[in-house]
Amino acid sequence: VQLQAFGGGLVQPGGSLRLSCVASGSIFSINAMGWYRQAPGKEREFVAAISMGGGSITYANNVKGRFTISRDNAKNMGYLQMNSLKPEDTAVYYCVADSPVTVVRTSPAYWGQGTQVTVSS
């Protein structure tokens, strides 16, 4: 499974960004995907996860209500809509995948390259 994330950039506090992730390869081996992030000097942390059909969605407490995870299985795409961004959201964001969604929340096997998100005025 190969994952490629894109859509990061520089945004002002309070702004929005949408990250995208495209999956390719042996995608039949996975049914859930998610997002992690790593800020400078900090450990990598879980952000959000979504099951194959979208029936199970989980968010980290510090993004709940501001971020929305979604997916388009027909296009093998995943998305992370980020609103009301704060400087503390600045990090490299990684797209991940695995099965089942409980594994995505804790220790996913498949990681894409990161995309930088910088929230600054």
Image (spheres, grey):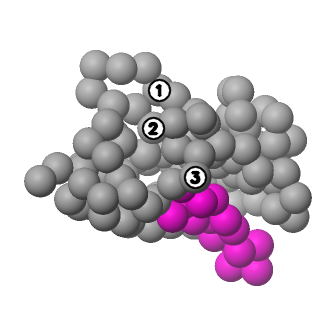
Which amino acid does the dot numbered 2 rest on?
Arg
Residue 50 is left or right of residue 3, and the answer is right
Which amino acid does the dot numbered 1 rest on?
Arg
Earlier in the chain: of badge 1 and badge 2, it is: 2
Q: Secondary structure at mark 3?
A: loop
- Measured as percent of width and height from the top left, residue 37 is found at 45, 38
- Measured as percent of width and height from the top left, residue 39 is found at 33, 31
Residue that protrudes farthest toward the bottom in the picture = 74
Which residue matches tag 2?
37
Q: Are marks 1 and 2 in contact (CB under 8 Å)?
A: yes
How packed mark 3 is, by other alpha carbons closer than 10 Å (few <14, some 14-19, many 20 or more), is few
Earlier in the chain: of badge 3 and badge 1, it is: 1
- Magenta stretch: dominant secondary structure: strand
Residue in the foreground of this view, choosing between 76 and 45: 45
- Measured as percent of width and height from the top left, residue 56 is found at 84, 51
Residue at image point 32% right, 46% down: 86
How packed mark 2 is, by other alpha carbons closer than 10 Å (few <14, some 14-19, many 20 or more), is many
Q: Are marks 3 and 2 in contact (CB under 8 Å)?
A: no
Instruction: Give the extent of the magenta segment.
Output: 67-81
Residue at image point 71% right, 34% down: 105
Residue 93 is left or right of residue 86, and the answer is right
